[in-house]
Amino acid sequence: MPSVETRGGGRALLRNMAMQTIFPLLAFLVGVVVPLQAAVNNQLRLLLGNSTLLAALVSFGTGCLTLALLSLATGQRWQNLAALARVEWWMLLGGVLGAGFVFGTTLLAPRLGVATMVSLIIAGQVFTSLCFDRFGWLMMPLRELSAARLAGAALVVAGVLLVNFGDRWFGR
């Protein structure tokens, strides 16, 4: 019979393997949500008298309510919110940035098209992410910029160019 350490090590190995599979899949699904969210919010905008701001407000409010309900359902310790008394102002920018993202995608999707908008969002995310990795901004772990990672970023730029100008360059 295996020792307790072996069984525990096996569980840790399985958990690590699951995270290596589930986390990338979750990241992909988050990416799937971005164009879907933009399209849904565009329909909401049209219903609300073409108001991008009101559509973003309703979307963000619904998201806030969803998070509150999930916090209740999962037994989050609401008393931990008392730590907000010690928060520095810039730590609250995540909500401001999230609201800006929802507003921006609601504004831009019908004007640029979803594929153009998302390709530019991804390019911005890759560029900024590489900077965070390289410089460790906001105490993120440092990761070197290898030639392969820079080549990947260049391929993203090539993808953005093809999504936005490919039909003009190569015809339909």
Image (cartoon, helix red, strand yellow):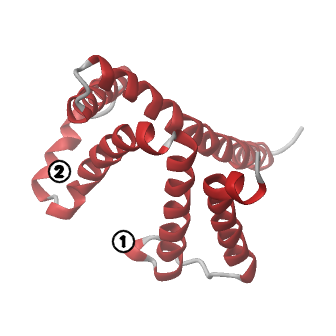
Identified at 55% across, 62% down, the residue is: 123
Q: Mark 2: which amino acid?
A: Ala
Against 92, residue 81 (above or below) is above
Residue extending farthest right:
1
Q: Which labelled disc corresponds to residue 138?
A: 1
Q: Quadrant of the N terminus?
A: top right
Instruction: Report the side of 13 relative to 83 (left or right).
Output: right
63 or 125, which lies in front?
A: 125
* Amino acid type, mark 1: Leu
Distance from the alpha carbon under mark 1 to that under mark 2: 19 Å
- Residue 29 position, x and y percent, is 61, 37
> Where residue 27 sits in the image (x, y, percent)?
60, 45
Which mark, by number, is residue 83? 2
Badge 1 or badge 2: first in the primary sequence = 2
Find residue 69 and report its horizontal and vertical position in percent: 31, 21
Q: Which residue, as the protein is rendered here, is positioned at the far top?
A: 47
Horizontal relation, residue 139 to residue 55: left or right: right
Is 135 situated above or below 49?
below
x 46%, y 29%: residue? 39
- Report helix, strand or loop for mark 2: helix
Looking at the rendered image, the quarter that the C terminus falls into is top right
